Amino acid sequence: MDLHVVLTLAMHVTALTPPHRPAEPPAAAGTIPADTSSLTISVDSSRHLVTLVAGPFHVPAMDTLGDHGTAHNTPLQRFEWPVDGWIRGFDFRLSDGLGDPVPHSVLHHLIIVNFSRRALLYPMFERLIGAGAETSAVSLPATVGIPIEQGMRLGFYVGWHNASGYPLDDVYVTVTLRWLPKNLVPAPVGFLPLHIDAHETVGVSDRYDLAPGWSAMSYEFQLPIDGRLLAIGGHMHDYAVSVQLKDLKTGTVVSELPAEIDERGRILGVGRRLYGVWGDGLKLHAGRSYRITGVYNNPTGRTLVGAGMANMLGLFVPADRAEWPPVDLDDPLLQRDLASLNSFGRVSSHTMPNDPNDQGVIR
Ligand SMILES: [Cu+2]
């Protein structure tokens, strides 16, 4: 099973209904041209595919090369999920108005938010799908999937990272989601994304400053419900060493994921662990305290502002999904998450309150 996520009716291919959120009038003045893109959804019920096509987008050129935090987000586009079942894989491609491919490298991240479900540890909306430029197609075995219901309210956005030096026009994003039908026998094992961050501040960026030399950032939490991990992956930035999850009752390290960096310290990836789709997986316990710790070694001799990030994304099978905390719209943190998502595409990236790359994306 490949973990790059991190981490969603008719006879034939049928174009479904209201694909489409009419373009909103350009809100507040910003540095990004008014967005006139739309989103269409189609369902292929014989091949069990849901396809989203978003665009056309104007992709601005970045002013400086390379910084992780300067991605330009598109406005959030909302849609309803069209079928009951489980999501078991996804793929995406970029193309221009003629259908010719556009390099994946201009896409920094692609996120599908689920407004109908909460994250387990934080009062923020579930990040159902998260992908980065280097994410390849994800296809899980037909024995597991993320449970999803028709009518769940989702949102889609991408962040651009166009270092080509010139703006691109007429860019379309096509996302293909493979699903398992509700009547599948035996029913697949349903898992949900478990996002654990060493520096989570809902609705605000979870990036933090890296002091020179060795440093560690930790966050302790109590797991609210019992469950088991099928797999876990991590996400970190340049000069990363590792990210670790520790059981504070037993003192044992639940999972340690080493970062892979190149000779200049640039991040290549973070390890992942598979605990098995069959059998018990790795048990985590309700009420128990755990600690996530991200370790960096910054060799530059100076503090790197906002350069650190450390998170893990687990594929988590709750012992009883009915115990999953519900969406509470009165929760101010959830409202802050919502406000942040709604601000995308409407403010300059330099004043943006949130770095959306940092929401459970495994790259
Ligand atoms: Cu990051």
Image (spheres, rainbow, N blue to C red):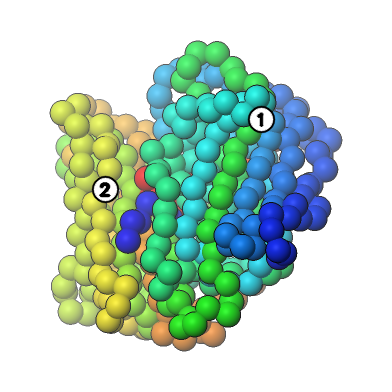
Q: Decide which of 325, 222 is in the foreground and name it.
A: 325
Label 1 secondary element:
strand
Of the 4 image quadrants, the one containing the C terminus is: top left
- Looking at the image, which residue is at 41% across and 73% down? 143
Q: Residue at x 15, y 28 (%)?
A: 263
Q: Position of residue 11 (x, y in %)?
A: 70, 63
Percent position (x, y) of residue 99? Answer: 62, 29
Q: Real-space Cα distance between discs 2 and 1?
A: 31 Å
Q: Position of residue 44 (x, y in %)?
A: 64, 57
Image position of 285 with respect to 363: above or below: below
Rendered-image quadrant of the N terminus: bottom left
Looking at this rendering, what residue extends furthest in the front direction? 11
Please state if 263 lies on the left or on the right of 38 as rendered. left
The residue carrying mark 2 is: 270
List the single residue furthest toward the top.
Answer: 165
Secondary structure beneath label 2: strand
Residue 355 is tagged as none
The verdict on label 2 being within 8 Å of ligand 1 is: no
List the residue tagged with mark 1: 57
- Amino acid at circle 2: Val
Q: Position of residue 275 (x, y in %)?
A: 25, 70
At label 1, counting other C-alpha atoms closer than 10 Å, the crowd grade (few under 14, some 14-19, many 20 or more) is: many
Q: Is residue 334 visible?
A: no
What amino acid is at disc 1?
Phe
| Label 1 beta carbon within 8 A of ligand 1 | no
Residue at 46% from the left image edge and 46% from the top image edge = 131
Location of residue 251 with respect to 122 vertically, above or below: below
> What's the residue at 46%, 69% (across, down)?
145
- Asked if residue 52 can be seen in this view, the reply is yes
User: Label 2 crowding class (10 Å Cα cut-off): few <14, some 14-19, many 20+?
Assistant: many
